[in-house]
């Protein structure tokens, strides 16, 4: 289940990266820059933060789910499986 949840989160990151505005918003809220993204991606909680970010915006959640052929409930299940990240500021 964890590997499947990670796959959903990686797809979420690809989805965010597909639109510069989406990626910029995520980076800003996570306290990251394009230069620090790669390093942060290897930290515990990063994939969870990706899904937290997507789930926090209903329109983004539905767009992601539709793009990936997932249900919003499946995205939520993956988010829960990865664990909750509170205040995901990776720039600190």
Image (tube, helix red, strand yellow):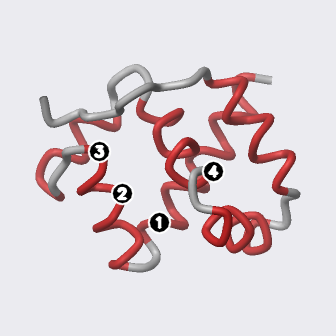
Q: What percent of the width, then of the height, locates residue 48? A: 53, 33
Q: State the mark number for residue 52.
A: none
- Residue 63 vertical placement versus 26 (above, below): below
Characterize the local packing of mark 4: few (<14), some (14-19) or many (20 or more) Cα atoms within 10 angstroms: some
Give SS at disc 2: helix
Residue depicted at 68% across the width and 46% down the height:
8
Q: State the mark number for residue 30.
A: 3
Which of marks 4 and 3 precedes in the sequence? 3
Q: Residues under labels 2 and 3: Cα distance?
A: 6 Å
Q: Residues under labels 1 and 4: Cα distance?
A: 12 Å
Characterize the local packing of mark 1: few (<14), some (14-19) or many (20 or more) Cα atoms within 10 angstroms: many
Of residue 68 and residue 71, the one placed in the foreground of this image is 71
Q: Residues under labels 3 and 1: Cα distance?
A: 13 Å
Left or right: 54 as drawn, with respect to 43: right
Residue depicted at 34% across the width and 37% down the height:
41
Q: Residues under labels 2 and 4: Cα distance?
A: 12 Å
Of residue 55 and residue 16, the one placed in the foreground of this image is 55
Q: What percent of the width, then of the height, locates residue 45? A: 44, 25
Which of marks 4 and 1 precedes in the sequence? 1
- Mark 2 and 3 residues: CB-CB less than 8 Å, in contact? yes
Q: State the mark number for residue 26.
A: 2
Left or right: 64 as drawn, with respect to 41: right
Left or right: 66 as drawn, with respect to 13: right
């Amino acid at each position: 289940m964890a590997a499947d949840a990670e796959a959903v989160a990686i797809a979420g990151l690809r989805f965010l990266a597909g639109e510069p505005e989406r990626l910029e918003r995520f980076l800003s809220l996570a306290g990251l820059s394009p230069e620090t993204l790669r390093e942060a991606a290897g930290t515990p909680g990063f994939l969870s933060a990706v899904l937290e970010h997507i789930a926090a915006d209903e329109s983004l959640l539905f767009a992601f789910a539709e793009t990936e052929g997932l249900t919003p409930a499946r995205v939520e299940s993956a988010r829960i499986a990865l664990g909750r990240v509170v205040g995901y500021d990776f720039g600190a």
